[in-house]
Image (cartoon, grey):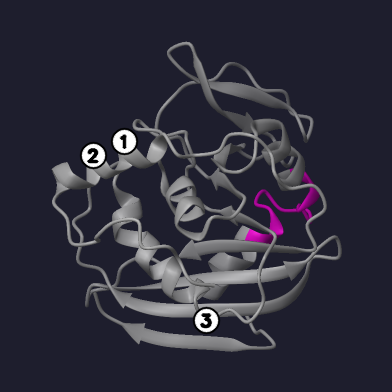
Amino acid sequence: MKGRNLHSWQVSVAEAKEIQRVLAAQVVRRSEIENPHLIAGVDISGVDSRGMARGAVVVLRFPELVLVEQSVATLDISFPYVPGLLSFRETPLILAACERLTVTPDLFIADAQGIAHPRRLGLASHLGLLLDVPIIGCAKSILCGRHGDLGEEPGTYAPLLDGEEVIGAALRTKRGVNPVYISIGHRVDLEAAAHWVMACLRGYRLPEPTRLAHLAAAGQLPAPKVEQARLSI
């Protein structure tokens, strides 16, 4: 898979924020996925002492959730750490891994925010526009917004609000653990996002695609095929 060239990556913080504002208007908030056969998860490792990070994409066959392929890329991270601009640090890394896939996923789930973001363009939405794919943001913490009380029953969710706008939902995936925070990435709606995240659970807090992507980024996931690249931007 190759991403579209929507903008330069060599930008200032102010330019990055303006790019987010422009791209946010292009996010499709309706669902365009019905029967996915291949679902991908994406995640990255932390930046090491050399300024390097590893990004991973894993592809699972649905509904069995059997691992089909994984791709891992290692990249020099040069964009500064700025809250709300993590996609400018991390998206090139995920794109590098996606470009080495030999299969084309029908749906992506990212361990990241979608429109649950101050400028409505988190990494999931950014990546969705670049690849032009249906994608769900499924984060472990809140970047912005608030929600009310949430029941303990798996599948229970509460809207995530920024002012009066619904930007996502807190979704209970397992009893006794914190919820995940889902949001529209691109070409899905919030109801579909909740449905596919729940359909991808295998007894853990995180859906299987992003859980395995986390392991792959950490170098802890055996796979039938591993593509690695060492890149620098």
Are there few (<14), some (14-19), or many (20+) residues within 10 Å of tag 2? Answer: few
- Residue assigned mark 2: 18
For this orientation, the residue located farthest to the top is 164
Q: Amino acid at mark 3?
A: Arg
The answer to whether 52 is drawn above or below residue 86 in the figure is below
User: What's the residue at 24%, 61% (across, down)?
Assistant: 9
Range of residues picked out in magenta: 198-209
**Closest to the observer: 63 or 179?**
63
Drawn side of residue 56 relative to residue 75, left or right: right
Q: CA distance from mark 2 to mark 3?
A: 30 Å
Binning the other alpha carbons within 10 Å of mark 3 as few (below 14), some (14 to 19) or many (20 upward) gives: some
Disc 1 designates what residue? 21
Q: SS for tag 3? A: loop
- Disc 1 crowd rating (10 Å Cα; few below 14, some 14-19, many 20+) is some
Identify the residue at image location x=32%, y=41%: 20
Mark 2 / mark 3, whichever is N-terminal: 2
Looking at numbered disc 2 in the image, what kind of residue is underneath it?
Answer: Glu
- Compared to residue 140, the image places residue 218 above or below, namely below
Which residue is tagged 3?
A: 100
Q: Name the amino acid, label 1.
A: Arg
